Image: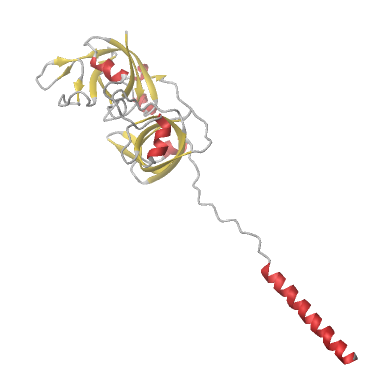
């Protein structure tokens, strides 16, 4: 009997040990946090310090001020309180794009002025004919982000100075400029051209020349992908006369010099 009791006790101990071992084997280990692959967001100063030769990858967050019409992506004018950015052909879903402007219906009169939503952009800093831009970019909405629409900064006094380029891509204003003649294909003086050389027709980009009377003549443009035929600004430029004095607003695009994309015209 004693022997049987000893055998049974040994068997129970073995079973208990096995049970403990099995329980230890099924305990889940503490999860190990996965390393984050998120890239740090740059300040505007960090972005501005990078070369614009296509070699620098950039990660920025800023607020959408305006967008050109959607075509497998979007060209965007972005700004924060420190500076501005131009995103060329950024990849963004059409659904997300529509939330920036309220529609993707490009009817006559459509304007791409945006609602100031915050976006995250990853791409490459490049330059084309003097315009510093972000190319090969992906654009995503920042969920729950705040909104910001920049006021137009008066840069009239900077015309003819190197300092004007420091405001590239910002929302800007020009005051008391004078409309001067452009020449069409027939050599006639006209207040504006459809296309840069007059080869276009209504619905094309509108080009017109202005001066402050002290410095050079500047060519401004109504980019038809930004402000369509029938929009207030498009029709205002079509109604200009040589010698008109105007206040203008737009985005300081650059093409071998200042070539603003105009979004507002007031004839004085």
* Rendered position, 28 above or below 232: below
- Determine whether, in the image, residue 145 is placed left or right of residue 5: left
Residue extending furthest right?
Answer: 2
Count of numbered badges drawn on the protein: 0
The residue located at (14%, 15%) in the rendering is 189
Give coordinates of residue 35: x percent, y percent: 55, 55
* Rendered position, 169 above or below 265: below
Give coordinates of residue 248: x percent, y percent: 33, 17
Give coordinates of residue 17: x percent, y percent: 76, 77
Q: State the image quarter where residue 4 is shown.
A: bottom right
Give coordinates of residue 160: x percent, y percent: 31, 20
Residue extending furthest left?
Answer: 186
- Name the foreground residue: 173 vs 143: 143
- Name the foreground residue: 11 vs 193: 11
The residue located at (50%, 29%) in the rendering is 147
Quarter of the figure that contains the N terminus: bottom right
Quarter of the figure that contains the C terminus: top left
The residue located at (67%, 69%) in the rendering is 26
């Amino acid at each position: 009997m004693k022997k049987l009791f000893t055998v049974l006790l040994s068997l129970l101990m073995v079973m208990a040990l096995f049970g403990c071992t099995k329980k230890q084997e099924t305990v889940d280990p503490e999860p190990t946090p996965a390393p984050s692959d998120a890239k740090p967001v740059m300040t505007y100063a960090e972005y501005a310090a990078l070369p614009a030769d296509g070699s620098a990858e950039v990660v920025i967050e800023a607020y959408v001020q305006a967008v050109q019409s959607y075509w497998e992506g979007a060209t965007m004018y972005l700004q924060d309180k420190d500076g501005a950015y131009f995103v060329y052909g950024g990849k963004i879903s059409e659904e997300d794009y529509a939330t920036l402007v309220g529609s993707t219906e490009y009817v006559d009169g459509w304007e791409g002025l945006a609602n100031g939503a915050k976006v995250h952009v990853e791409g490459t800093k490049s330059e084309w004919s003097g315009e510093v831009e972000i190319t090969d970019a992906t654009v995503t909405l920042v969920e729950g982000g705040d909104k910001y629409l920049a006021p137009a900064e008066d840069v009239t006094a900077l015309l003819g100075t190197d300092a004007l380029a420091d405001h590239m891509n910002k929302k800007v204003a020009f005051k008391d400029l004078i409309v001067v003649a452009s020449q069409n294909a027939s050599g006639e003086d006209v207040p504006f051209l459809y296309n840069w050389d007059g080869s276009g027709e209504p619905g094309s980009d509108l080009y017109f020349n202005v001066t402050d009377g002290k410095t050079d003549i500047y060519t401004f443009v109504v980019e038809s992908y930004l402000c369509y035929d029938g929009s207030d600004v498009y029709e205002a430029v079509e109604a200009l006369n040589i010698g008109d004095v105007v206040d203008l607003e737009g985005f300081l695009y650059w093409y071998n010099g200042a070539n603003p994309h105009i979004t507002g015209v007031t004839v004085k």
